[in-house]
């Protein structure tokens, strides 16, 4: 039974001004309509931004520790409802249940982390060069933020944006993916239940073309945080006023290096997880594996054998290893790239087809696909496919492998499997990516460190926690000088 959901504007759940609706379908079974939701228009965005602007004047004055208490309550609710929410993620987005639960756990972790930042939004106090004067820096909120999120992490990524925005004292207008509106609604409901005041969090459903772009460029919005494709992110950055704060977390063409001294069992496990976890629908997915020529044939044998054992199906079933792609367009895109790989001369070792057997006939399934003898310049080794397709590339040595990994326009995540500490040190220095893993796959970033990439993988501030993370995005510095000498003192002149 499909659930009918609404926008949240100024604390009120309401229909869109257009009266139009869209449907969210279960990608594993398109006969299952998950939700019916508003196809909003510009008027809805205008109302939400106005509400956020009004609420900002009150919310920014709420002490940060009090804001943190609200987030702590939200985190506790997320913990209590983890199983329910994880199953919803799997039903609406398609990833297997352990990953759906992991999606929720990431939101829990981020919410607790940012709640604690309510007592750690620190600046610094330093000595003045003049007597009877003190100097300090503090963090202050920026204003109203547009938060635009994708479908592949429908609860985690919204939490990555909403929680730091709120703890810093901003208000938000949240536009989730049209493919996962119910997940977004559940997260916002939890924030409302936790005590977020009216207008502080506003939710507007709809398409990227009608709602997302208008929201990002709205004159009442002070900052934009976007996660999605590189093409859309770069377009938004060009459309936005240069005075706006903007952060775009975008695509990747990530690679795992497997050296000749690597533990091949561990490397194969990491490549399977990186390439086919979330059906390859992660910006950090390992779509390339660069293998030393001495172990290339043996790695391929083990890797293909492991890929063939993966079981496709509905992610709610315990035996399923790989779920569906998000929609028909994405499935057709993946199949086009498989055809391109064959035309380019890469050797297809397994997979390569849509899978329509049994219950999978109702969803968007593509077999886990492995290409061998891939040249670094081939399109399947250069362009982001965002599906269960892995290209295996031969390298002569470590220098050659690093050159191959860096030879793409993206720079999000990379990994190396080696037992040689010196090789790992060289790799972590030379790999031009925002994330580098040693003897681990390219996926699995932790929330207490900044997340983001180089080159066309990211624009602006990094996300998540730690120094240089989301707190930098959602706050600005103010420096305060207080002179209590009772006379005019001139810095750099009075000595």
Image (cartoon, rainbow, N blue to C red):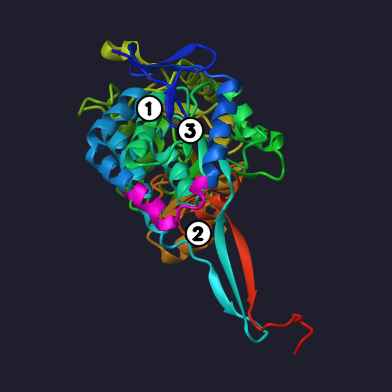
Are discs 3 and 2 less than 8 Å apart at CB? Answer: no
Is 64 magenta? The answer is yes
Position of residue 203 in the picture relative to residue 129 (left or right):
left
Choose between 409 and 451: the one closer to the eye. Answer: 451
> Relative to 100, does residue 182 appear above or below in the rendering?
above
Please state, as top left, top right, bottom left or bottom right, where the C terminus lies in the image: bottom right
Start-end of magenta stretch: 58-72
Sequence-first disc among 3 and 1: 3
Kind of element beneath mark 2: helix
Query: Mark 3 and 1 residues: CB-CB less than 8 Å, in contact?
Result: no
Image-based side of 255 in relation to 105, left or right = right
Q: Residues within 10 Å of mark 1 (few under 14, many from 20)?
A: many
Dot 2 crowding, Cα within 10 Å, few <14, some 14–19, many 20+: some
- What is the chief secondary structure element of the magenta stretch? helix
Which residue appears at 51% of the width and 54% of the height? Answer: 471
Is 299 or 142 nearer to us in this picture? Answer: 142
Q: Is residue 219 visible?
A: yes
189 left or right of 433 in image: left
Residue 147 against residue 129 in the figure, above or below = above
Q: Which residue is mark 1?
A: 368
Considering only order in the chain, which callout, 1 or 2, is on the residue closer to the N terminus? 1
Q: Nearer the viewer, residue 422 or 495?
A: 495
Which residue does the numbered mark 2 point to in the structure image?
428
* Secondary structure type for disc 3: strand
Quarter location, residue 113: bottom left
295 in relation to 41, above or below: below
Residue under label 3, please give it: 202
Image coordinates of residue 65 in percent, x first then y, are: 40, 57
Spot occupied by residue 333 in the image (x, y as percentages of width and height): 52, 20
| Residue furthest bottom as drawn | 495
Indicate whether residue 247 is drawn in magenta. Answer: no
């Amino acid at each position: 039974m499909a659930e009918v959901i609404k926008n949240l504007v100024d604390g009120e759940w309401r229909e869109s001004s257009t009266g139009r609706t869209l449907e969210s379908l279960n990608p594993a079974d398109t006969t299952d309509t998950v939700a019916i939701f508003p196809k909003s228009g510009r008027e809805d965005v205008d109302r939400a931004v106005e509400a956020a602007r009004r609420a900002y004047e009150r919310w920014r004055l709420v002490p940060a520790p009090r804001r943190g208490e609200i987030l702590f309550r939200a985190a506790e609710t997320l913990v209590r409802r983890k199983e329910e929410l994880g199953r919803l993620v799997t039903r609406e987005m398609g990833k297997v249940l352990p990953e759906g639960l992991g999606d929720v756990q990431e939101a829990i972790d981020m919410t607790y982390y940012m709640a604690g930042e309510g007592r750690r939004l620190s600046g610094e106090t330093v000595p003045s060069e003049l007597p009877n004067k003190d100097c300090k820096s503090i963090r202050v909120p920026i204003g109203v933020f547009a938060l635009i999120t994708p479908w592949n992490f429908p609860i985690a990524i919204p939490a990555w944006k909403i929680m730091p925005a709120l703890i810093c004292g901003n208000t938000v207008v949240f536009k989730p993916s049209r493919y996962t509106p119910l997940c977004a609604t559940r997260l916002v409901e939890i924030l409302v239940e936790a005590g977020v005041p009216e207008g502080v969090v506003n939710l507007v459903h709809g398409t990227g073309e009608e709602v997302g772009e208008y929201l990002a460029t709205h004159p009442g919005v002070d900052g934009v945080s976007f996660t999605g494709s590189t093409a859309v992110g770069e377009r938004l950055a060009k459309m936005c006023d240069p005075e706006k704060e903007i952060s775009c977390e975008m695509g990747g063409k990530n690679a795992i290096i497997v050296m000749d001294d690597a533990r091949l069992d561990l490397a194969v496990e990491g490549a399977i997880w990186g390439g086919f976890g979330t059906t390859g629908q992660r910006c950090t997915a390992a779509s390339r594996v660069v293998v030393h020529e001495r172990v290339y044939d043996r790695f391929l044998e083990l890797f293909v054998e492991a890929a063939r054992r993966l079981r496709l199906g509905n992610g709610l079933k315990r035996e399923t290893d790989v779920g569906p792609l998000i929609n028909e367009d994405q499935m057709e895109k993946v199949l086009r790239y498989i055809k391109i790989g064959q035309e380019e001369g890469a050797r297809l070792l397994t997979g390569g087809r849509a899978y329509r057997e049994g219950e999978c006939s109702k969803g968007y399934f593509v077999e886990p696909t492995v290409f061998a003898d891939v040249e670094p310049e081939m399109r399947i080794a250069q362009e982001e496919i965002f599906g269960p397709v892995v290209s295996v590339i031969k390298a002569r040595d470590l220098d050659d492998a690093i050159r191959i990994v860096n030879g793409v326009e993206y720079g999000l995540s990379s990994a190396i499997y080696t037992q040689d500490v010196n090789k790992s040190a060289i790799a972590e220095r030379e790999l031009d990516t925002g994330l580098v893993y040693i003897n681990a796959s390219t996926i699995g970033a932790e929330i207490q460190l900044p997340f983001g990439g180089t080159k066309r993988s990211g624009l602006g501030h990094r996300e998540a926690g730690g120094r240089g993370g989301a707190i930098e995005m959602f706050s600005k510095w103010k420096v305060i000088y207080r002179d209590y000498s009772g006379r005019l003192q001139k810095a750099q002149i009075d000595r």
